[in-house]
Amino acid sequence: MGVSGIFGGLAGMVNGALTLGAMTAAYPWQKLYAGDPRWPVAVLLGQVLVAVVVGGLYVWWPAATEAARLRIGGGDPVVEPFVAVHPAVGDLEQ
C-alpha cells in the first residue's frame, strides 16, 4: 500500500464521517417534515422555549436562595461591596 492509498483511505474516512454526521443531524428533521411540515418548526420553538426557561431558572434559583444558603453555611447574607473591603483598593470609609 503506497502513500496514495493511505491518503485515499484517510480521505474516505473523513468523507464518511462528514456524511454520517450530516445524515445524523438532518435525518430526524427530514422525518418530522415528512410526517407534517409544521412539526420541525414546533419542535424547534419548543427547544428554544425550554432552553430559555431552564437558563432563566439556572440564573434565578441561585440568586433567590443565596441568603438562605449563606445563613445555613454560617455566612453573613448582607455582604459589603467588594470595593469597600478589598485590601488593594483600601478602606473607602475614611
Image (cartoon, rainbow, N blue to C red):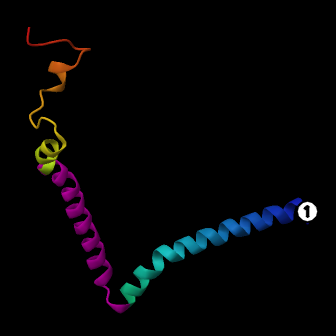
Q: Label 1 belongs to which residue?
A: 2
Q: Nearer the viewer, residue 75 or 53?
A: 75
Q: Nearer the viewer, residue 23 or 64?
A: 64
Q: Does residue 79 show up magenta in the picture?
A: no
Vertical side of 75 occupied by 56: above or below: below
Vertical side of 2 occupied by 71: above or below: above
Vertical side of 17 occupied by 64: above or below: above
Q: Nearer the viewer, residue 34 or 45?
A: 45
Magenta residues: mostly which secondary structure? helix
Name the amino acid, label 1: Gly
Please name the residue shown 16% across and 47% down the image. Answer: 69
Please name the residue shown 12% across and 43% down the image. Answer: 71
Going by the picture, which residue comes out furthest to the top?
Answer: 94
In the displayed structure image, the side of residue 48 where residue 64 appears, left or right: left
Classify 10 Å Cα crowding around label 1: few (below 14), some (14-19), many (20 and above).
Answer: few
SS at mark 1 in the image: loop
Q: Does residue 61 show up magenta in the picture?
A: yes
Please provide percent x and percent y for residue 28: 43, 81
When asked about the image quadrant of residue 74, the answer is top left
Q: Nearer the viewer, residue 38 or 50?
A: 50
Q: Quadrant of the C terminus?
A: top left
Please provide percent x and percent y for residue 3: 87, 59
Please name the residue shown 23% across and 55% down the image. Answer: 58
Range of magenta residues:
35-64
In the displayed structure image, the side of residue 80 where residue 27 appears, left or right: right
Q: Quadrant of the N terminus?
A: bottom right
When asked about the image quadrant of residue 37, the answer is bottom left
